[in-house]
Image (spheres, grey):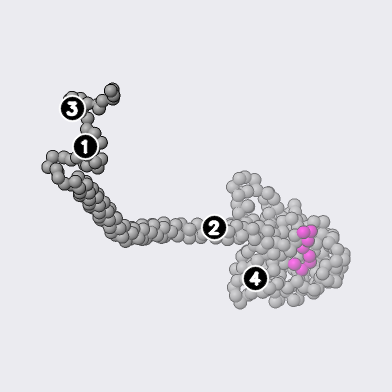
Amino acid sequence: MSTHEPSADRDGRPAPTGADLPPRSAAVSGESEEPGTTGRPGAVGEAEAAGGADEVGEVEERGEAKEAGEGEKAGASERTGASEPAGEPEAAGGSGEAGAGEAEAAAEELRPRSRSRDLLLLAGICLLTLLLVNAFVARPFSVPSASMENSLRSGDRLVANKLAYAFGGHPERGDVVVFDGTGSFRRGPAKPTGFGDGLRAFAQDLGLAPAGDSVYVKRVIGVGGDRVTSTGPGGRITVNGVPIDESSYLAPGDEPSNVAFDVVVPAGKLWVMGDHRSASRDSRDHLGEPGGGFVPEGRVIGRADWVVYPIGHWTGGLDRSSAFAAAGGSGGHGDQR
């Protein structure tokens, strides 16, 4: 007797045999069926497919809407961007024009200042040049009297060459010189005594102040070591025993000297006389004074080389007579050329 019995269900019914078992697909379908879908084996699949299609459509719609929104935003930004650059050049151009205008205004303000500064600088350079020229090169003077006619007339403007005796040079016989007669032709100290006198002398040396009454212009007749003599009216002046022919520069009708004298010029001194002898107060008139009528070489300002005014008296060099050449070699300065 077989002890194997068919198993029973939980409710007590016997389990179905293999012949009674439903097909697997039917079982699966039957188990997954929902109410209302009985008898339609593909209903669930179709619903699922339809739901999936709806979901895909919704996703696509959302994607399209999103893309459309992004497209609208991009278009708006493009439009905004297209409009903004159009304004930027205007703003940049406006600011550039404003900057250029400000720079031009600043330049206009600086221009007058620059011109004024340049003019002041130019005036300063001209003044400095004038001072240097007057102090070391040449200095203008006005002839104060007729004592040098006809070589120089009263009121003539001449230029004294201050370089003529620089670098070891000395006045020579026949030179027309401008000199300071203080201490020789005029009584008084050779040097200024106070601050005001010193300042005035300094200004005169620079040509910034009138020369004053102490400045003279005369012709050199004798230099240091020379013996100068005159016998008076009707006779010539002699230098170291040599008669001098002064007819080339003496004023017409004048005698060489109406005063007789016989002097030896000390070293470093000069004997000077005017060309208009009858109207000149010169070395002859100071014979009895402490200086003896001799002018120290150190008081010579320069050689009168040029007459610059009036135009009719222009000359590039005053006559230096060759008559003194015969007395050369006997003076304190050696040969006179």
Q: Are marks 3 and 2 in contact (CB under 8 Å)?
A: no
Eye-nearest disc, 4 or 1: 1
The disc, 1 or 2, on the residue closer to the chain's N-terminal end is 1
* Magenta stretch bounds: 167-175
What's the residue type where badge 2 is placed? Leu
Q: Earlier in the sequence, mark 1 or mark 3?
A: 3
**Is disc 3 placed on a helix, strand or loop?**
loop
Mark 1 vs mark 2, CA separation in Å: 133 Å
- Three-letter code, disc 3: Arg
Q: Main secondary structure of the magenta part?
A: loop
Measuring from the top left, give residue 29's x and y in whole percent: 21, 41
Residue 206 numbered mark, or none: none
Q: What percent of the width, then of the height, locates residue 55?
A: 22, 48
Query: In whole angstroms, how far apart are the C-alphas of marks 1 and 3?
Result: 13 Å
Q: Is residue 57 visible?
A: yes
Identify the mark nearer the N-term, 3 or 2: 3
According to the image, label 4 marks what residue? 307
Residue 121 - label: 2
